[in-house]
């Protein structure tokens, strides 16, 4: 049975930072051109907090389909369809209205990868918002019940 470790705020912050940086490095490095950068900036500027929540719901609904989380993430078909519908409306709003000029320039000058890279930036911002929510941060911090930063450092130092 796991025992609760007692550690300082400094070590807790270090563990949280390490986890967060690790999650961010899971996404592939994207090198964008000038037009992709402009499209990314426009997407971010044109996306409201409500839009970001729609994106987070859509991402979660899609991730819930992974077999590894089958037993812990239950998203109904109607909720998944609602998330897909909201996301489709958001994409249409962003690409055909809010960022129409930037979308055309990026596609013309840098190709379809510009869309993928720009939406990856938007997805990273949404994920950052997700992980910075106090409830989610507390859930991540609960890992400290099972391991401390000091314990991890000792294991890495001594090869255990």
Image: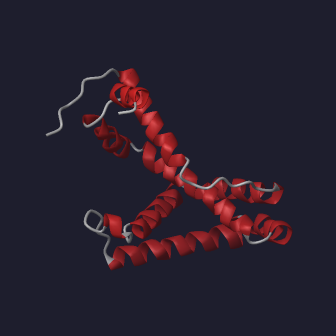
Q: Nearer the viewer, residue 144 or 76?
A: 144
* Residue at horizontal 61 percent and vertical 70 percent from the top: 91
Does residue 18 appear to the left or right of 106 in the view shown? left
Q: Quadrant of residue 38?
A: bottom right
Where residue 96 sits in the image (x, y, percent)? 70, 73
* Residue 76, x across and y down, in percent: 31, 75
For residue 118, above or below residue 142: below
Front-most of 40 and 69? 69
Q: Position of residue 121 (x, y in %)?
A: 63, 55
Image point (51%, 41%), residue name:
21
* Residue 151 is at least partly visible in this image: yes
Total number of numbered discs in the rendering: 0
- Camera sees residue 47: no
Toward which corner of the image does residue 99 lie, by quadrant?
Answer: bottom right
Residue at image location 34% in from the left, 78% down from the top: 78
The C terminus: image quadrant = top left
118 up-or-down from 100: above or below: above
Q: Quadrant of residue 115?
A: bottom right
Residue that protrudes farthest toward the right in the picture: 109
Q: Position of residue 89 (x, y in %)?
A: 56, 74
Image-based side of 51 in relation to 77, left or right: right
Quick check: 151 left or right of 46? left
| 4 over 87 or under it: above or below | above
Q: Residue furthest front?
A: 159
151 or 14, which is in the foreground? 151
When the figure is inspected, residue 123 is found, relative to residue 67, above or below; the finding is: above
């Amino acid at each position: 049975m796991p025992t609760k470790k007692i550690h300082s705020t400094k070590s807790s912050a270090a563990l949280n930072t390490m986890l967060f940086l690790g999650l961010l490095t899971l996404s592939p490095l994207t090198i964008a051109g000038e037009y992709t950068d402009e499209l990314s900036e426009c997407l971010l500027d044109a996306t409201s907090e409500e839009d970001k929540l729609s994106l987070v719901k859509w991402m979660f609904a899609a991730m819930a389909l992974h077999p590894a989380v089958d037993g812990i993430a239950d998203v109904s078909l109607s909720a998944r369809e609602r998330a897909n519908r909201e996301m489709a409306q958001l994409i249409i709003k962003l690409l055909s209205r809010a960022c129409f000029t930037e979308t055309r320039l990026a596609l013309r000058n840098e190709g379809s990868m510009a869309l993928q890279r720009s939406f990856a930036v938007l997805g990273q911002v949404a994920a950052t918002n997700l992980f910075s929510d106090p409830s989610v941060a507390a859930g991540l911090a609960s890992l400290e019940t099972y391991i401390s930063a000091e314990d991890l450092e000792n294991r890495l130092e001594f090869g255990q």
